Amino acid sequence: MTERIELYPGIRLTVFTDSRFKQNCLSIQYVRKMDRSEAAMNALIPSVLLRGTNSAMDLRQITLRLDELYGAAVSPISRRAGDYQTTGFYVSMMDDRFALDGESVLEQTLSFVKDLLFDYPTENGGFLPDFVEGEKVNQIAAIQAELNDKRVYAVRQLLKNMCREDSFGIPRMGEVSDVAAITPQALLEHYLRIRRESPVQLYYVGSAQPQRVARCLREMFAFEQRDYRPLPDHTPLKLSGKQDIRERMEVAQGKLCMGFFTPVTNRDKDFAAMQVMNGVFGGDVTSKLFQNVREKQSLCYSIGSSYYSAKGVVLVSAGIDFDQEPHTREEILRQLELCRRGEISDTELLSAKEALISALRGVYDTPSSIESYDSAMELGGSGLTPDAHMRALEAVTREDVVNCAKRLLLHSTYFLEGGSSHEAD
């Protein structure tokens, strides 16, 4: 059973009551408009908050406190959903039914989470410099690790150029230079603005009754002085000019990315049909791209397509030999044309639908998957439940897939090839 409760203006709680799990979960997410000027700070803040409180001044004391709470765990959250970015915590805690002597694990855990959010040590008008600098190093390392994965790097480069006039082109963790420029004072000032202005999305999965959870969270936020400012609605994708980008690097394998766009987003009535279309095209091992471009023609080592439904972007990514680039491009477009002409077998259609439906069936298996799915649907503006989503997928016809394929258009491409110079067309 799902219940949604408005705790205060701009602070909304969703409770999914379910007694199947030994571990319950709670997510606390401040929601921001995705913006280059603050993306890196939004990603950094929860990690800095987790370094210590005024009553638990270091990671060792934080760990000891969590151990006392039956091994509760708190991890940072920084997610992207369309034009929005979130910052906050994901909390896992034992259900009260398994505690000794009737202890209230929920209340005790939320009391500690309140300290993490609001009772942090400061110095000279900012967060503690050691906390900030330590987490900046970690965030820069995470960004660089992504860049060292050449497939991820190629996708990121294409998105940054294809969507450079849209929030979707902003890296979720910011650029290395953005992180390096953050000061303890600027970070605390920004966090105080977040606390004051931002919508807050709270999501609980567990056996506790909604009103009990609501009471605990009302108490957590009761003292906050807020000037809540609603966020603007998600906007259609703002595309830059078309580009065919080529970059040289010392790599053993070429990385080809082709960026397509569609007006169909997760807020559109044809959302499920577009998901199936992507599945038929390149979303799985039964897809046309995998079966034909990789298996039958051996044009690539890896290939697949991803549908970023909040903005209507489909990316095809392939690992190839450098000399196979023109043939691979041509064949990718030919497979899309087959979809547009309706040359889709029953097996391709059913396999694509079943893969998507199977994933949705798994949503109810863990508290984290329930929280992740519903949070994404709410933030993205869809609001689909897993059951409604499955019904929509089951109803998709071959004609629906054809119509979606016809609305998918190539915009820009990126090719990472061997060499040492850089050039772009």
Image (cartoon, helix red, strand yellow):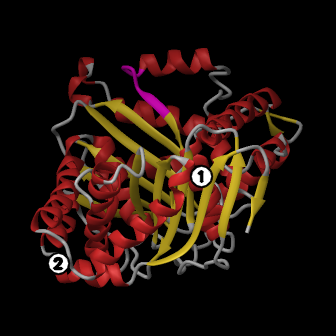
Identify the amino acid type marked 1. Answer: Ala
Q: Quadrant of the N terminus?
A: bottom left
Residue at 45% x, 73% y is 312
Where does residue 368 sit, x and y in percent of width and height? 33, 42
Apparent side of residue 398 relative to residue 293 in the rendered image (left or right) = left
Q: CA distance from mark 1 to mark 2?
A: 32 Å
- What is the total number of numbered labels drawn onto the structure image? 2
Residue 98: quarter of image: top left
Q: Quadrant of the C terminus?
A: bottom right
The magenta segment: 69-74
User: What kind of element bears circle 2?
Assistant: helix
- Residue that numbered label 1 is attached to: 154
Where does residue 45 sit, x and y in percent of width and height? 66, 43
User: What kind of element bears circle 1?
Assistant: helix
Where does residue 284 sit, x and y in percent of width and height? 28, 53
Q: Is residue 180 visible?
A: yes
- Residue that numbered label 2 is attached to: 398
Residue 342: quarter of image: bottom left
Residue 73 on the magenta span:
yes
Q: Is residue 99 above or below residue 188?
A: above
